[in-house]
Image (cartoon, coloured by chain):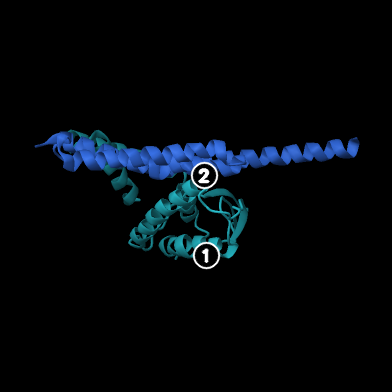
Amino acid sequence: MPVLTVALVAMWLALNDTVAPGQVLLGIVLAMVLTWWAARLRPLRPRLRRLQLGFGLLAVVFVDIVRSNLAVGRIILGLVGRRRVRTDFLDIPLDLQDAHGLAVLAMIVTSTPGTVWVGLATDRRTLTLHILDLDDEQKWVRIIKDRYERPLIDIFQP
Amino acid sequence: MTGIESPWVAVPVVLLLVAGGLLTLVGSLGLVRLPSFQARMHGVSMGSTLGLGCIIIASVVVSSAMAQRFVPHALLITVFVVITAPATAIMLMRASLYRARAKSAAGRGAETEG
């Protein structure tokens, strides 16, 4: 819980672009009130086990954002040669069950062009994605599972 | 030599802005060139990811150069966009699926009746 408070204070100070004592105090008060209020709205709390793994994941996602932007741009401009681009839905078996981990996975999938989150089965066992360039289903399943899901399980699940 | 007139600031800023603009332009071109609604969603997200990222970094560099200190608050835009984008993307995708399903059900209904 203090993680959220600290993050909100940092965000408040960055937004106001200041470290004046008055703003620091106001930020702390706001962050504490908002955190307390949000906790009452949604009692489910994330358990961050190994947050340091997040940095590696962040780097992986950054590389993938750049790569997928270039790949999607190439498809839009028709620079893929004679290859036919197959756009389709893909079901991925999911082991990640933590709600916060799934939320982060949704952010990653949305932030990389070429993949859009379609839906999660009600038992959280199957994730459906829409993929612009579905050349090899197994390749895409491995990308999601190895590159994103594995670190997220390590971070969020015991 | 200070501020944004310095080539050490101006050149990277211009490159970043041109790259961001081109990425957003190509992504928006996808609205015309891609065949289906679902496919077009992929194009538009180019502008809100790497395209936006380039422009935000350019903005941070310019404001830092002008203020003569590190001014990172534009980076918060990334945080807000990354956190909120999935909600709209998932809603749009589900709405399009719902419509496709409703349309095909109506089509089938008309076939069996007619």
Residue B94 appears in the figure: yes
Q: In the image, what residue type sits under mark 1?
A: Arg
Disc 2, SS: helix
User: Compared with residue A29, is residue A99 higher up or lower down, i.e. above or below?
Assistant: below
Tell me the chain of label 1.
Answer: A
Q: Colour of chain A?
A: cyan
> Residue reaching furthest front?
A82
Depth check: give the residue in front, A49 or A139: A139
Image coords of residue A89 (percent x, y): 62, 52
Helix, strand or loop for disc 1 = helix
Q: Nearer the viewer, residue B8 or A60?
A: B8
Q: Which mark is residue A76?
A: 2
Nearest to the observer: residue B41 or residue B84: B41
Q: Residue at x 17, y 35 (%)?
A: B4
- What is the three-letter code of the residue carrying label 2? Ile
Number of marks present in the image shown: 2
Task: Choose top left, top right, bottom left or bottom right for residue B93.
Answer: top right
Q: Which residue is mark 1?
A: A142
Q: Earlier in the sequence, mark 1 or mark 2?
A: 2
Q: Is residue B67 left or right of residue B53?
A: left
User: Mark 1 touching mark 2, by CB under 8 A?
Assistant: no
Q: Position of residue A115 (x, y in %)?
A: 52, 50
Q: Which chain is blue?
A: B
Task: Tell me the subunit letter for badge 2.
Answer: A
Name the spot of residue A26 as percent of width and height, x first: 24, 35
Residue ID at (80%, 38%)? B107
Check the image and report above or below for A57 versus B96. Answer: below
Where residue A9 sits: x, y (%)? 27, 42
In this rendering, the label closer to the viewer, 1 or 2: 2
Residue A32 appears in the picture as rendered: no
Task: Write the residue at 45% across / 48% down.
Answer: A111
